[in-house]
Amino acid sequence: MSDIAGRGYSNADKLVSTEWVAAHLNDDKVRIVESNEDPLLYPSGHIPGAVEVDWVKDLNDPLRRDYLGREGFEALASRIGITPDTMVVFYGDKSNWWATYALWVFELFNHTNAVIMDGGRLKWVEEGRDLTRDKPSVSPTGYSAPERDDSRIRAFREGVLQHTQANGQLVDVRSPGEFSGEKLHMEGYPQEGAVRGGHIPGASSVPWSRAANEDGTFKNAAELRGIYLDEMGLSPAEPTIAYCRIGERSSHTWFVLTNLLGFADVRNYDGSWTEWGNSVGLPIEK
Amino acid sequence: MADYPPILQEYLDDFGFVTSREERVDFLIAIADEFQPVPESVATKPYDEAQRVIGCESEAFVWALDREDGTLDFYFDVLNPQGLSAMAMSAILDRSCSGAPLEQVAAVNGEFVFTFFGKDISMGKGRGLTELVNAVVYQARQRLKSAQI
């Protein structure tokens, strides 16, 4: 058995173990979804029966900077064979960074029956579990989705500005060098940089990866509270906005604060530093 | 301007015919399957940090050993077991640049990684793979520079 239930999370049901997934490979009520940064990983071998959701071509609007709309989500959900009642289990590379991003987008369409496989792809592989290159045979569904709800877990520039002017809680999950303004972009991501360096005034610096163990699993609740509450002084009762560079790393922190620590109101600012640091007239701290 | 190493040019020509993402991915996975990490006769872990490719999140390392004919043998390792793209790139560089004239290797432009991996690759992957190419090119340019002194 997995120890997830004993880690003290506020909502341990949002995580499943590799053992749990292995036992539900043929469960009709479960759809396993791999979401990675590296496009070669899924085709090179994936959990038997798992489908792929690609963060570039599947989750983003192909033209403007935004996520897919209702029709696009319905087409995606139908293609991967889920209904609103299907439990979607996301997993992927980089400590589930991209899996939490996909889960966050799914929740914009109120598909909240979605969980993360703790440890992601790396843990599954290192445990020597089966991988296949066979594409699963999926019967398309006719998924009917609501309009995307951006009000609950997504933040926009004007809202962030008001939030910071009211001294609201902000978590900057980028690297310390990006937070300080020493770097204008994440190591290795120069094209996604900004004209100005620094951070949104009042933000706490907690790099996203601090919430993960070496094996890609999430730290337990006591360890997470030590970082976000004791060290950073964040209050679970206060509205909180997480941001990074384009909103993907911060979706990992959004997942941690919302589901593992039980913060009441967390929003992900996907405009993040590539919007804030390039905007005219917005306040910046260094 | 020198030509690219012929084998690299062949790869580029082949990828020029790729018409779908699926075909591209299958092609790259087949190449990645041929990746051979650096033999212990050349380097053992923990590797010298001087051989690390800065900016490659897949933790790639590159070595260049001199051949008697003045060209270089390149060796690679990728420590991240999920670094499949880096393994594919390493296999391409090993096969095409080892033993190639230094002038041709030195003329290589890392931008060609997008010919192999397509424009949909993330910025991070693109940068890491470009730096892997640059590490090989750097070695060739250093040897040429030394030869001129």
Image: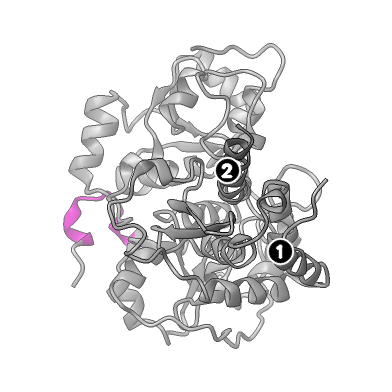
Determine which residue is flagged by label 1.
B8
The magenta region covers: A4-13
Residue at 53% in and 62% down:
A35
In this rendering, the answer to whether A232 lies above or below B32 is above
In screen coordinates, is B67 left or right of A76?
Answer: left
Residue in the foreground of this view, choosing between B2 and B31: B2
Q: Residues within 10 Å of mark 2 (few under 14, many from 20)?
A: some
Query: Which tag is nearer the camera, tag 1 or tag 2?
Result: 2
Discs 1 and 2 carry the same chain letter: yes
Chain under callout 2:
B
Residue A187 percent location from the top left of the image: 51, 36
Determine which residue is flagged by label 2.
B143
In screen coordinates, is A260 left or right of A195?
Answer: left
> Can residue A82 be seen in this snapshot?
no
Q: In the picture, which quadrant includes the N terminus of chain A? A: bottom left
Residue at 67% in and 68% down:
A76
Query: In this figure, which colouring scheme has been used for the structure?
Result: one colour
In screen coordinates, is B22 left or right of A16?
Answer: right
Residue A73 percent location from the top left of the image: 68, 62
